[in-house]
C-alpha cells in the first residue's frame, strides 16, 4: 500500500461517512437534496405510491430482490450502487481514452468515486436505490467492446428491455453504417424483442396492458412539469405554464431526435470513433424521453470523462458544477408552483436540459465548422500533374 493509495481510500471513506451523516443526522438537508418525487395515487409499489412504469420484463428481472429483508436489501443496493459507480468511472475513462486496453485513470478510481457520489444524479441514485447506474454500465460496457466480440449489442437490448430510454442506442448503432455497429444494433434489437417475448410469456395480461396502453401514458411516471423532470417535456410545460405542452413539445422531440442521431453518426463516420457519438445519443435520449428524472442523468459521468480526456478542464468544471448545484430544488414546488415560475427561474428549474441542448448545439457548430474547413482545403489543394507516357527513345536509353 502506497501513500497515494491510502489517501485515495481515505477520501472514499470520508465521502461515504459524510453521505451517511447527512442522511442520518440532517433529515432536513436530506429532504432538500434527495426528496422523493410526489405523484398522484396510481399503482402503488412503495410507500410514496409511485406507479409501476417499466416493462413487465423488469418486474421478472427484479423478483429476486423480494427474497431479501428490506434492511438487507437497502444495504445491498447502496453498496452495489457505489461499486457500479466505480465500474462506470473505469468504463467511462476507457471509452474516453479511445483505447479498449486502457485500465488506469489519471486519478485513483476511489477518489473519483468519492467525488462522483456528490453529483446530484449519482447522489439520488444511491440514496433512492435506483438502477440508473446499472443501466449506464450495461450500455457503456457493451458499446466499448470490440466489434468482433461475441454477442455485442445484447446488453444494450437488455437495458432497453428494462427501461425504454436506452432503446435510442439501438437506432444509433444501426445508422452509423459501419458493419460492426450494424451487426451489434441488430443483436440489440433481437435482444429487446426477446425481453418483450419473455414478458409476454410469463406475464401475458400485464404485457398486453403495458405495450398497448401504458407505454403511451407519458404522464404515468409523474407530473411532467415537476422540476425533477429534466426532459424537454418538463422544460416546455414549465415555460408555457401548462401541464400539457402539446404539439410544440412533440415537434421539438422529433427534431432533437434526428439531430442527435445525425450528430452521433457524423462523430463516428468522420472521426472514426464514437467518443462524442455516445454522449450525444445519451443526452438526446434523456431530452426526448417524456420523463427524465434527475437520477437518469448519470450519463454526466461519461460526459465528464470525455471532456477531461480531451483536456477541456474548464468545460468539465462547469459541467460538474451544473450537476452538483441542485438548482432545480431551489425553485418553488408547492401546489404546482413550477407552472408559475418567472423567466429567470426557468433556468434554475432546467439545468440538465439546457446543458444537454448546449452540448448538442456545440457539436452541431463543430460539425458545421469542420465541413467549411474541409471545403476550403479541397479548394486550395493543388491538382495532380498528368503523367506523360515515356518516349521510345527514352525507353531504349533506359534499356
Image: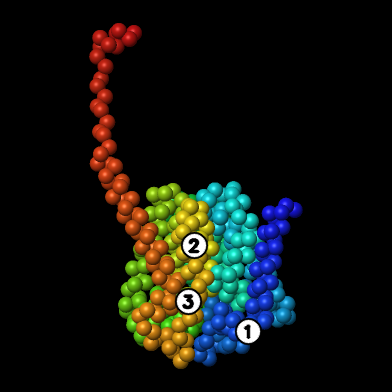
Q: In the image, what residue occupies the spot 58% across and 83% down?
A: 31
Asked where in the image residue 241 lies, by quadrant, the reply is bottom left
Tag of residue 286: none
Q: Position of residue 83 (x, y in %)?
A: 66, 65
What distance separates the C-alpha of mark 2 from that of mark 3? Answer: 16 Å
User: Which residue appears farthest toward the right when viewing the image?
Assistant: 1
Helix, strand or loop for disc 2: helix
Q: Position of residue 50 (x, y in %)?
A: 55, 85
Dot 2: few (<14), some (14–19), or many (≥20) neighbours within 10 Å?
few
Task: Tell me: residue 399, above or below residue 360.
Answer: above
Q: In the image, what residue occupies the spot 46% across and 59% down?
A: 314
Q: In the image, what residue occupies the spot 42% across and 83% down?
A: 225
The residue that mark 2 highlights is 317
Cβ–Cβ under 8 Å for marks 2 and 3: no
- Nearest to the observer: residue 328 or residue 240: 328
Rendered image coloring scheme: rainbow
The residue that mark 3 highlights is 327
- Nearest to the observer: residue 87 or residue 396: 87
The residue that mark 1 highlights is 27
Asked where in the image residue 81 lies, by quadrant, the reply is bottom right
What distance separates the C-alpha of mark 3 from that of mark 1? Answer: 19 Å
- Nearest to the observer: residue 195 or residue 204: 195
Q: Position of residue 7 (x, y in %)?
A: 69, 59
| Side (left or right) of 44 relative to 281 | right
Of pointers 3 and 1, the one earlier in the residue sequence: 1
Helix, strand or loop for disc 3: helix
Amino acid at each position: 500500500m502506497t501513500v497515494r493509495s491510502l489517501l485515495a481510500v481515505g477520501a472514499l471513506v470520508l465521502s461515504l461517512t459524510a453521505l451517511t451523516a447527512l442522511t442520518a443526522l440532517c433529515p432536513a438537508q436530506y429532504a432538500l437534496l434527495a426528496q422523493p418525487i410526489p405523484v398522484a395515487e396510481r399503482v402503488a409499489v412503495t410507500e410514496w405510491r409511485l406507479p409501476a412504469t417499466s416493462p413487465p420484463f423488469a418486474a421478472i428481472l427484479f423478483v429476486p430482490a423480494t427474497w431479501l429483508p428490506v434492511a438487507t436489501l437497502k444495504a445491498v443496493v447502496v453498496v452495489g450502487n457505489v461499486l457500479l459507480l466505480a465500474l462506470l468511472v473505469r468504463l467511462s475513462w476507457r471509452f474516453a481514452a479511445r483505447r479498449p486496453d486502457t485500465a488506469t485513470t489519471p486519478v485513483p478510481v476511489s477518489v473519483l468515486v468519492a467525488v462522483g457520489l456528490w453529483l446530484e444524479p449519482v447522489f439520488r441514485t444511491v440514496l433512492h436505490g435506483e438502477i440508473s447506474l446499472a443501466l449506464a454500465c450495461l450500455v457503456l460496457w457493451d458499446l466499448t467492446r470490440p466489434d468482433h466480440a461475441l454477442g455485442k449489442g445484447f446488453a444494450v437490448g437488455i437495458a432497453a428491455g428494462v427501461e425504454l430510454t436506452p432503446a435510442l442506442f439501438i437506432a444509433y448503432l444501426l445508422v452509423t453504417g459501419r458493419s460492426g455497429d450494424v451487426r451489434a444494433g441488430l443483436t440489440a434489437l433481437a435482444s429487446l424483442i426477446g425481453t418483450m417475448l419473455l414478458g409476454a410469456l410469463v406475464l401475458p395480461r400485464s404485457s398486453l396492458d403495458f405495450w398497448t396502453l401504458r407505454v403511451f401514458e407519458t404522464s404515468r411516471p409523474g407530473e411532467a412539469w415537476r422540476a425533477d423532470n429534466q426532459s424537454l417535456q418538463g422544460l416546455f410545460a414549465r415555460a408555457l405554464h401548462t401541464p400539457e405542452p402539446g404539439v410544440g413539445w412533440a415537434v421539438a422531440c422529433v427534431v432533437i431526435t434526428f439531430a442527435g442521431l445525425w450528430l452521433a453518426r457524423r462523430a463516428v463516420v468522420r472521426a472514426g470513433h464514437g467518443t462524442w457519438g455516445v454522449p450525444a445519443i445519451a443526452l438526446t435520449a434523456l431530452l426526448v424521453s417524456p420523463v427524465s428524472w434527475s437520477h437518469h442523468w448519470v450519463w454526466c459521468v461519461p460526459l465528464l470523462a470525455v471532456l477531461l480526456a480531451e483536456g477541456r478542464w474548464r468545460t468539465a468544471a462547469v459541467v460538474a458544477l451544473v450537476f452538483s448545484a441542485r438548482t432545480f430544488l431551489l425553485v418553488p414546488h408547492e401546489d404546482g408552483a413550477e407552472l408559475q415560475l418567472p423567466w429567470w427561474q426557468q433556468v434554475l428549474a432546467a439545468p440538465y436540459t439546457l446543458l444537454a441542448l448546449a452540448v448538442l448545439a456545440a457539436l452541431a457548430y463543430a460539425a458545421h465548422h469542420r465541413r467549411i474547413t474541409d471545403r476550403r482545403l479541397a479548394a486550395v489543394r493543388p491538382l495532380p500533374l498528368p503523367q506523360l507516357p515515356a518516349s521510345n527513345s527514352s525507353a531504349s536509353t533506359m534499356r
